[in-house]
């Protein structure tokens, strides 16, 4: 009887030890990945920030554009037709260049900031925008920028 109980205990221990992590999102992961829990949509980012300048959060949205130079940034669609700029913590990872139209979850910090004309033009060049589109950039932009420490490209 002791051997049976010992065997069952060992089997249960083995099953738990080799169980897959069900706390992460299904999909291709970059950086630190994203653990499940408290995920909001891009439509909710402004409200969650409230009066704060910077706040930690997990956000899901659809990619509209990826840097075509290296994949070093991407934009997520906002419900008002605008986009939220997403860069990657410490320039530690890059996104596939063909990611536009896919849904992702990002984990990191949303921050209200003003992006300079110089930076906006640089990002437009990296996104392979035309010279005419780049020339139209003449004013800094107040926006919410997201610094992601982890990204998951969702499978569905």
Image (cartoon, rainbow, N blue to C red):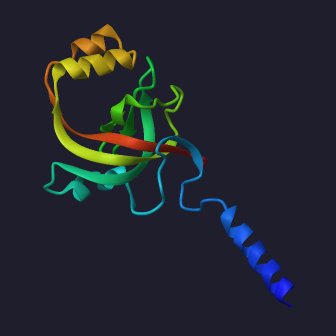
Q: Quadrant of residue 149?
A: top left
Relative to residue 1, is residue 59 drawn left or right? left
Q: Please tell me whether residue 131 is drawn above or below residue 27 in the rendered image.
A: above
Q: Residue furthest top?
A: 131
Q: Quadrant of residue 90?
A: top left
- Residue at coordinates 82% horizontally, 78% vertically from top-left? 7
> Going by the image, does 67 lie left or right of 138?
right
Q: Where is the N terminus found, in terms of image quarters?
A: bottom right
Examine the rendering and report whether any part of residue 13 can be seen.
yes
Q: Is residue 120 above or below residue 1?
A: above
Percent position of residue 46, x then y: 24, 52
Give coordinates of residue 28: x percent, y percent.
58, 42
Q: Nearer the viewer, residue 40 or 38?
A: 38
Which residue is drawn at the image coordinates 19% and 18% (left, top)? 118
Find residue 60 and report its horizontal and vertical position in percent: 43, 50
Which residue does the image show at 38% across and 51% down from the upper left? 59
Q: Residue furthest bottom?
A: 1
Q: How many marks?
A: 0
Residue 79 appears in the figure: no
Question: What residue sits 52% from the left and 32% below the top?
Answer: 99
Residue 80 vs residue 40, the one in the foreground: 40
- For this view, does 20 lie left or right of residue 121? right
Q: Position of residue 152 (x, y in %)?
A: 51, 45
Could you say which quadrant of the image residue 148 lies in? top left
């Amino acid at each position: 009887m002791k051997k049976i109980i010992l065997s069952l205990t060992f089997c249960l221990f083995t099953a738990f030890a080799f169980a897959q992590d069900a706390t992460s999102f299904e999909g291709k992961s970059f950086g630190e990945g994203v653990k499940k829990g408290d995920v909001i949509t891009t439509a909710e980012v402004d409200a969650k920030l409230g009066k704060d300048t910077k706040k930690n959060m997990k956000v899901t949205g659809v990619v509209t554009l990826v840097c075509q130079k290296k994949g070093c940034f991407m934009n997520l669609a906002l419900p008002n037709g605008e986009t939220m700029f997403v860069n990657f913590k410490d320039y530690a990872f890059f996104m596939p260049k063909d990611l536009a139209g896919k849904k992702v979850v990002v984990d990191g910090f949303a921050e209200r900031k003003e992006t300079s004309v110089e930076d906006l033009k640089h990002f437009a060049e990296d996104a392979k925008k035309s010279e005419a589109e780049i020339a139209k950039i003449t004013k800094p932009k107040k926006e919410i920028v997201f610094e992601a420490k982890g990204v998951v490209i969702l499978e569905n």
